Structures are given as structure tokens and as C-alpha cells.
Amino acid sequence: MARRRNREWHTGPGASAVRPPSPRPRLIALVIWVSFLLIHTTVVAQEERGTGAVVVVPITGTIDLGLAPFLTRVLAEAEADGVAAVLLEIDTPGGRLDAVLQMRDAVLGSPVRTIAFVDRTAFSAGALIAIAAGEIYMPPGAAMGAATPVDGGTGETASEKTVSAVRTTFKATAEARGRDPLVAEAMVDPDVVIEGLVERGELLTLTTGEAVRWGYADGVVDNRAELLVDAGLAAAPVVEVGPSLAERVVRFVTDPVVASLLLILALLLIVGDFFVEGFGVAGMGGVLLFGIFFWGHLLTGLAGWEDVALVGLGIVLIAVEIFVVPGFGVPGVLGLAAIGGGLFLAMLGREIQTPDGIMRAGLTVVASLVAVVIGIGLMLALLPRTRKLSGLILQPAGEVTAPRREPAAWGWLRLFGDVAVQPRPG
């Protein structure tokens, strides 16, 4: 026993066993090895994107909120790494106005050389991103323009206020890049007339040849390889990037249908937690879903911390209604209004508002609250009540005789039929 270096130890009288090797050295070695791999991977990635590299960013399909933080991140990393250029490969029919305004600001504000390659189409929002780039290349047969904002619900042209704001944004972007601003305005407003290019009542969409003639294309190339040669970047290493896992999750969370489901489940879980004693798994799950909802909308620039505070205030008011004030009165109504208002503002964003965006946010919140009310009604009808729910239900005054319970119906009969409870004198 005195010799601690002995590799045998006693577990009982006359019994001995070989001391197992300590796991600490292996654990330390594993941590060092993983750390080395992470550092090595980071250094390699930085070297690949280092000075002289061309970073390729795909902007394809419908532009949604998840693309804005992705492009912003890539441009910031490109500036930090000192890359030669960022190549935006665009092929899109357009997308959300609030998202493209964030992307336009990121491209215009970046000191990195930016090149747009309009691969086939850059309509609507895609045209604004292309114009924001420092250089534009197009292949034969490509098209760019048709940028009048429309209401996604009806397909009608947006309000005059929205059209004017978008037209001014296109004009300012073209001026910032030294291009004819009237051409950019004609992509948005059909009332703009340009002799030899577009008549009144026509919305401008530039072909490749027209874009070259009017200064909206710096070259005609068939593919990326030809573009790099023409731009003097043929010898530069090419690094293709894509959205990170977090950015893909943000795109998923900010989808209107997914956002509505998150709100419904979060509210139902939190309310359902009042049917059990204590704050349990359901309540924590609801808070987690609320956190995911606001995390996604905060990253995309839609929500602000004031929206989070408003929803938090609503939850506090409802808690006051349940635990302090008997019945359902002013605190409960104000709490629901605060939650609904906070969620509506979180989905609306801070950029130019369109009727489509307002309608989308409003319908999502209203549908979510209606579904929650229905869910609460079902829980009140089917689940047993706890002491935490007594604050929502006014109790009769005076002495009440103990009822004698008979077997009660369940399911649909319990919801819509008579409950078999007959009060009788004790």
C-alpha cells in the first residue's frame, strides 16, 4: 500500500487487480489532435481564400432572407482575407425586396472587387444585385431587368410609394457604379421613356447586346473561365463557397410556413405547461422554439430586440393574469396584443414595406394565434385542470356540496355532449 508506483491495488482481503490506465493522457492527446486539425483546417481555408483568390458566390433561384447574411458574411471574410475578387454568379427570377436591399447594401459597401456574371437571367431583385457589382458580364442570350415590385399575393403591381422607392434605389445604385441611371429606372417604372430602347408603357429588360451598348455589361463571355481571362484573373485560384449550416437553418426558419408552425408549437407548449404542476419539459420546449424563431429573424435583420422585449412583456402580462388576477381581464388581453404585435413586427422587417410583406406577416401571426386559441380550447376540454389553471376560472362563492361523479364521456362526446356529473346533497 505504501508503494503507490505498484500497478496492483487491493479491492478486498486477498484480492488484487491490475490498475487500469488513466484515461487522462489519452483525453489530452485527443483534445490536442482535434485542436490541431481545426487550426490546420482554418489556416488552409484562409490560404485558399488568401491574396489573389477569386471567391465564387452562387445567387440562384428565388432570393430569400437566408441569402442576405450569407452574402454579407462572404464579403466581410473576403475583405479580411484580401481576396482578388468576389464573383457573383446570378441566375434568378427575383425574390424578397427586404432581402435584396440588404444584399445590395453589402455589395455596394464592400471595398472588395465585385464582378457579376449574369448567367441567363437577372430579373427583378437579381438585376439590382448585378447593377450593384463593380463589373457585369453576360453570356449571349442572357437578360436583365423587369424589376417592377409586385404583390406576391395578387400578382398586381405594388403601391406607387413602393414603386417610387424601388425606382430611386435602382437609380442611386446605377449612379454609384457610373452607369446610366435612366436605364435602371426604366427597369422599374414603365412610364420611363428612353429613345431607341424602350417606349412608354413598356418595362425594360436588357438583352446581352443592349446591355453592352448601354453600358450595363463590361463584356460578353460564354462561361466562368472566359470571364476570368477577360477580367485578368486567369491565374487566380478559384474558391467556391456556399451557405453555412447556420445560414441554411435561418433560411428554413424564416420561411412563412415554418415560422407559423414554430409560433403555434411554442405557444401551445408554454400554455400546455400550465396543465401540469411545475415548469417542465413542455414549457422549456416552447421557450426554445421561441428562441429559434427570434434567432433566425434577428440574423436576417427582420426582428429587433424591441420585438423580443414586446413579446416578453406579453408573456409577463399573461403570467400576471394567471397567477395574480382572477378570471380573464385586462392583463390577459394586453398580453395577447403585445405578443401578437411583437411577432408581427418581427416578421415585417425594417426595410421598405410592401403590401405583400405586410399581408404575409399579418396572416402568419393571425393564423398562429387562431390555431393556438383552438388548441387551448381542446386542452381545456380534454385535459385535467391543475391549481395553476384556477386563476383563469372564476370559482363560485359560498359553500358547495361535494358532487358525486358518475362515469363521464370522453372524446367527441365530452367536447360536445353533456358531462355526466350530477351534484347531489351530501
Image (tube, grey):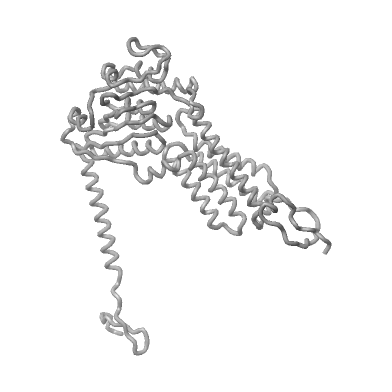
Q: Is residue 137 visible?
A: no
Residue sticking out furthest to the left: 235
How many marks are shown on the rendered structure?
0
Residue 4 image position (x, y, % from top left): 28, 80
In depth, the one of 152 and 87 nearer the eye is 152
Residue 108 image position (x, y, % from top left): 32, 28
- Tell me what residue is drawn at x 25 percent, y 54 percent: 37
Q: Is residue 231 above or below residue 284?
A: above
Which image quadrant for residue 100?
top left
Residue sticking out furthest to the top: 195
Residue 169 placement, left or right of 386: left
In depth, the one of 411 and 156 nearer the eye is 411
Q: Is residue 314 visible?
A: yes
Which image quadrant for residue 139?
top left
Q: Quadrant of the C terminus?
A: bottom right
Residue 56 placement, left or right of 416: left
Residue 325 placement, left or right of 232: right
Q: Quadrant of the N terminus?
A: bottom left
Residue sticking out furthest to the bottom: 14
- Tell me what residue is drawn at x 63 percent, y 52 percent: 379
- Tell me what residue is drawn at x 24 percent, y 33 percent: 85
Residue sticking out furthest to the right: 425
Residue 415 image position (x, y, % from top left): 69, 51
Q: Is residue 215 above or below residue 405?
A: above
Residue 282 image position (x, y, % from top left): 54, 55
Q: Is residue 264 above or below residue 407?
A: above
